[in-house]
Image (spheres, grey):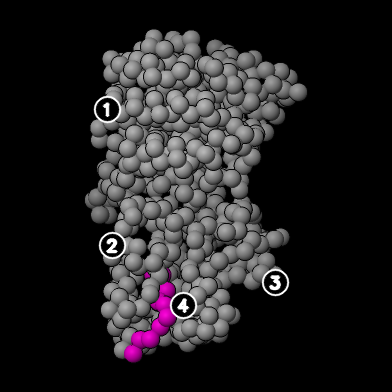
Amino acid sequence: MAKKVQLDGKVVANEWVTSSYFKMTLSFDTLPNILPGQFAELRIDQTPSVFLRRPISIHDVRPQTNQIDLLIQKVGDGTQWLSKRQVGDLVNLVFPLGNGFTTADMNQQTVLLVGGGVGIAPLLHLGRFLAQNGSKVQFLLGFRKKADILPLNTYQAVGDVLITTEDGSQGEKGFVTNHSVWNNAQFARIYSCGPTPMMKAVVQAARQKNIDCEVSLENKMACGVGACLCCVTQTHQGHKCVCTDGPVFNSNELPW
Amino acid sequence: MVDLSVKIGGLSLRNPVMTASGTFGYGTEFEDFVNFSRMGGIIVKGTTIRHREGNAYPRLAEVNGGMLNAVGLQNKGVDYFIEHIYPTVKNYDTNVIVNVSGATLEDYVACTEKINDLDGIPAIELNISCPNVKQGGMAFGTSCAAAAEVVRAVRKAYDKTLIVKLSPNVTDIAEIAKAVEAEGADAVSLINTIMGMAINAETRKPVLSTVTGGLSGPCVKPIALRMVWQVAKVVNIPIVGLGGIMNANDAIEFFLAGASAIEIGTANFIDPSVTMKVVDGIEDYMKRHKLESLNQIIGQLEL
């Protein structure tokens, strides 16, 4: 596991990609090795209602230029502050945090990456990493309606992209677990990140097909390094920290 | 060269900066960010005689200028600590102090006896002030009689430096401090978290699974300072001050109010290397004010 660092990243781009999602690109002098599924804790300054850092997944990594992309959903005052950072501003990060997805055993295998909402963010880095190591990557991404669909060209460059919308305005109608890809599902592993009800449905679907499944959880978090014990989730081995034992858990570890 | 060393009972600190229990894990979590040999001490996670799962999620509520927690002393028990954690932390080049918690008098004593046998642990911090456990915890810290009783029992079982961590959730913290001093405490540390709560107006539900939790962060500092000052006036044992310390300036304020050492807690979550910056900042303050020893500012509030 790479050493954790606390670094200022310089904003080189920060743009809205939909009405509520923005993509921030940060540049560093040096970049630690970041595994797919790991995250950063971002410092929010001079915002009275925000005290704690904000855990944000790593969307994409470009080691050649020491840049990372963060795909962020504006939820409250902390993410609002981040959305207003201008090119040239500094943002303080503690990273890379968490365990990351299991990838070593997936060479030449076909895998399904299922995401919903802001949960699609870490799946790009994961998909790219897996594809570079010879896996065949399929994304299955769920949105509420056509207007909510995030730009997908970066995903399409990595693998097949399948879409569901709840109202059927694009792709197949329904939730991700209603998609026809499940009919003949033959995947070596399913990776999922998104709203908890979606991930629980994905876990059930994977279990029925006897497919190994990893999910990335998001809990309210303070320290990000396993000290405060605030972000715990219930597992078959008792409470575990989402920040250090996770955020990625195999579905077999969870009482889902 | 400024002298930042300080003595707390039989315990020698190279500098007055320690980390508060429950905010720094067992130190290992922060290894990438700090240099242990530049810290006065690490007070490790609250340890109980038996394994505790802690409270249900959610355990955290962010508030203006701080946070509420309701962890509930999750830990794997003292035997696990001795077997799996002590072999590592005893080699740290700093004082490793165990925060001892319990639900009954017998639990406190049994846990203390086990820690007493560990040569690499020079002190305990007796936690009679956790607001997040149903039994025991704060109940011992909120009456003079109960506080005196548990300190008396633990004092008999413990030969090294005994620091008693006081609860701010009392009418008169100075009276509790006097009671534990009378039973042989070598020092008091204050304050533990202040009981508070957070409500989600949209859902009409409490934010924390336990409804109430412990408030910490810069929002509690004025209360902590006031309590350190009140206790300093009535006890002769050293005071370890904590509560919302975010930087060296905050630490200096605690020294002036009467603290001989300080603990940094919630600030570790915002800046994992904050302890190093506080040590540097204290040194800088001493130089700027031409002070040679910390004793020149401890309790030197000018009225």
Q: Residues within 10 Å of mark 2 (few under 14, many from 20)?
A: few
- Binning the other alpha carbons within 10 Å of mark 1 as few (below 14), some (14 to 19) or many (20 upward) gives some
User: Is B151 within the magenta?
Assistant: no
Separation (CA) of disc 4 from disc 1: 56 Å
- Assign a secondary structure to mark 3: loop
Give how far across and how far down residue B32 sits, in percent. 61, 48
The answer to whether residue B143 is above or below residue A230 is above
Disc 4: which residue: A150
Dot in front, 4 or 2: 2
Instruction: Give the chain letter at badge 1.
Output: B
**Residue at the (36%, 83%) spot, across then down:** A164
Q: Position of residue B90 (x, y in %)?
A: 55, 35
Mark 3 crowdedness (10 Å alpha carbons): few <14, some 14-19, many ≥20: few
Q: Which residues are magenta?
A: A184-195
Q: Chain of mark 3?
A: A
The span from disc 3 to disc 2 (Cα, nearest Å) is: 41 Å
Which residue carries the number 2 mark?
A255
Residue B104 circle label: 1
User: Hey, which residue is sitting farthest right in the picture?
Assistant: B1
Residue closer to the observer: B280 or A112: A112
Residue under mark 2: which chain is it in? Answer: A
As measured in the structure, the alpha-carbon distance from the residue carrying label 1 to the one carrying label 2 is 32 Å
Where does label 3 land, which residue?
A: A64
Q: Amino acid at mark 4?
A: Leu
| Cα gap from disc 1 to disc 3, whole angstroms | 58 Å
Q: Nearer the viewer, mark 4 or mark 1?
A: 1
